[in-house]
Image (tube, helix red, strand yellow):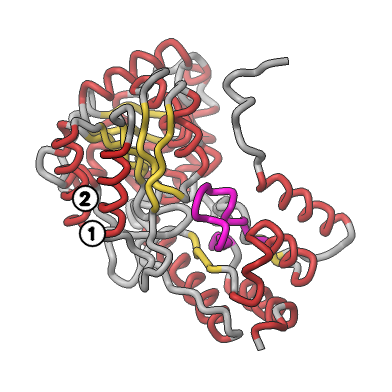
Amino acid sequence: MEFRRVNGLPPYVFAQINGLKAEARALGRDVIDFGFGNPDLPSPDVAVAKLAEAANNPRNHRYSASRGIPNLRLAMATRYKALFDVDLDPDTEIVTTIGAKEGLTHLMWVLLGPGDSALVPSPSYPIHLAGPGFAGAKVITVPMLDPGATTNDPGDDFFAGLVEAWQSAEVKPRVLICSFPHNPTSACVDLAFMTRLVEFALEHELIVCHDFAYADLGFDGYRPPSILQVPRAKECCVELYTLTKSFSMAGWRVGFLVGNAEIVAALTKLKSYLDYGTFQPVQIAAIVAMNEATEYPEQLRVIYQSRRDTLIDGLNRIGWDVRAPRGSMFIWAPVPEPYREMGSLEFSRFLIESADVATSPGVGFGEGGDAHVRFALIENELRTSQAIRNLRKALTKLG
């Protein structure tokens, strides 16, 4: 049987790791899981209480609005003004999405079609690489990081790759997908970098889609910039913001597309045919989270930074040289040289079997990922310290 939208998808290598985790746990082994970026921290109490209250009101059991109820879009506009000093019109420049993943996928349906192409950094979050293909478009990859770079952050090398990809493309790309802080590499950028992106997009008539999932997770004083802070960005840019990591509301599926009014209107029109929006009590609770739990993202950020420090310090202490990222909830760790020939999938398998530690193999994130594994900061400091002890015993070649 032919399934045209899915037959071309590469094997989902993470399923193999999940299978190994399940097998190990079935045998009673205590697997310390850094594999899936699924936040373990609770959602804000005020949001949970409001959800229960709103769910008890039968009026909220009816269909909602696919674009999001007005007060939710207003809360989003208020948050952007407070965080980034960016003015957004709740009626024309914001549409609610059922999480950023749904928003990005359907955005590609709006922006791309057969014969089009999109520029996507690689390695990247899998939906960034797959989303344009669902719309029938071709993906042109741009290396996210220079393999010889001394930092986790892109720079001139990224722009050189971007220019080369543009110039060599048979069909000039219509869309650039990017995400900073980046998943999986944890690459971070400053506002000057964003300004260069916007200038490049304006010059080449590109639409920039910035997935801003880790907007509130900057460390050591670093504050991730919104691309909409750049003058004229709204002429060519949209941004996806989500409550998943910022408020630890992963399962609630509350996201937003903000920015260029024409693009927002196009996605709003498409979604009016596809869904009736998130369950209304969830939207109401999300309003309360953004309006009344304004300090919660900072509390979460402190926890993630502490976990980052524990993991980075531990890995380096046992001889695994890993850089500390300035943002995201991930550590992008090079496979240690003595194990490099295994590749990331076999190395991840080895870590489960020999150390009861689960990671995500870099090969699952596309070209340029196979020399790394990704740690998600979803285990507390005690569990992380135990993982370091396990790794020290397993990674005998580190000396």
**Residue 273 appears in view:** yes
Quadrant of the rendering where the N terminus is positioned: top right
**Element carrying mark 1:** loop
Q: Amino acid at mark 2?
A: Met
The residue carrying pointer 1 sits among few (fewer than 14), some (14 to 19) or many (20 or more) residues within 10 Å by Cα, namely some
Residue at x-position 55% and y-position 27%: 56
The residue most toward the right is: 27
Residue at x-position 31% and y-position 50%: 161
The segment highlighted magenta reads 358-378
- Which residue is tagged 1? 190
In screen coordinates, is 150 left or right of 131?
left
Instruction: Out of 315 and 29, give the one closest to the viewer.
Output: 315
In screen coordinates, is 372 left or right of 213?
right
Q: Amino acid at mark 1?
A: Asp
- Which residue is tagged 2? 194
How far across and down, in percent of the image, does residue 38 sit?
57, 50
How far across and down, in percent of the image, does residue 66 sit?
40, 19
Between the residue at mark 2 and the residue at mark 1, the CA separation in whole angstroms equals 7 Å
Residue at x-position 67% and y-position 56%: 345
Is 244 included in the stretch rendered in magenta?
no
Q: In which quadrant of the rendered view does residue 228 lie?
A: top left
